[in-house]
Amino acid sequence: MRHECYTRGKRHLFCCRQCLADYSNKAKNPDGYDNLKDYTNMAINFSMIAKKLNPSRMTPQVREKIRNSLLGSGDGKTYEKTYGKHTHRVVAEQLLGRPLAEGEVVHHLDGNPRNNNPDNIRVFPSQREHAEFHAKLYAFFMGGGDAE
């Protein structure tokens, strides 16, 4: 049991970590769970505090330095990013001369998600049209003929 000096002002005392975990569990404590602190927007709040306390931290130069230090690391199984945004989307926006609209899908023609050459990028207006393209492509290769 904790000394009183360590528990003064606390609303709940728990005899062990399991009791604390049970109290914090929605399935085991549905009534008390609603009264627990909401952490939903905590990351946004911390970002705002960091910007106020250290506004010069993430300058474009610092962002570029961090980006360059991370380039080439990893297994190469994911999409490459440019300042936190998928590079193929950045390239597509440059090709179109405007930001991508909501729902627009960027497709790599050669199937290589790391090949962000503008000649390898195609933008579909919706996921539906992108899926139809893949269905026709599949039919062409598996059917051995005309995709139409």
Image (tube, rainbow, N blue to C red):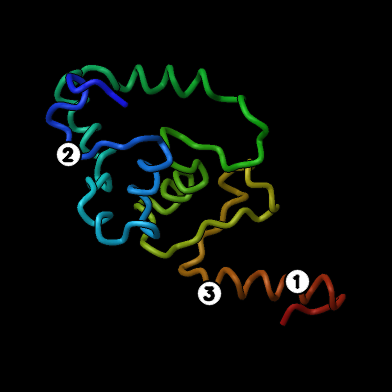
Instruction: Provide the residue designation for mark 3.
Output: 128
Give the amino acid type for the residue marked by disc 2 in the picture: Arg
Which mark is on residue 24?
A: none
Q: Reading the chain from its start, which is encountered first: label 1 or label 3?
A: 3
- Few, some or many residues within 10 Å of mark 3 (<14, 14–19, 20+): few
The reply to whether callout 1 and callout 3 are in contact (CB within 8 Å) is: no
| Front residue (pair 1, 35) | 1
Quadrant assignment for the N terminus: top left
Instruction: Provide the residue designation for mark 2.
Output: 11
Q: In the picture, residue 12 is in which quadrant?
A: top left
Q: Reading the chain from its start, which is encountered first: label 2 or label 1?
A: 2
Q: Reading the chain from its start, which is encountered first: label 3 or label 2?
A: 2
Q: What residue is at 38 percent from the left and 57 percent from the top?
A: 28
Q: Secondary structure at mark 2?
A: loop
Q: Position of residue 6 (x, y in %)?
A: 21, 21
- Few, some or many residues within 10 Å of mark 2 (<14, 14–19, 20+): few
Q: Nearer the viewer, mark 3 or mark 2?
A: 2
| Front residue (pair 147, 106) | 106
| Front residue (pair 7, 52) | 7
Please indicate whether residue 69 sits to the left or right of residue 135 in the image: left
Q: CA distance from mark 3 to mark 2?
A: 53 Å
Q: Secondary structure at mark 1?
A: helix
Q: What residue is at 51 percent from the left and 18 percent from the top?
A: 69
Rendered view: 132 above or below 119? below
Q: What residue is at 79 percent from the left and 79 percent from the top?
A: 146
Give the amino acid type for the residue marked by disc 3 in the picture: Arg
Q: Position of residue 87 (x, y in %)?
A: 50, 41
Rendered view: 148 above or below 73? below
Residue at far bottom of view: 148
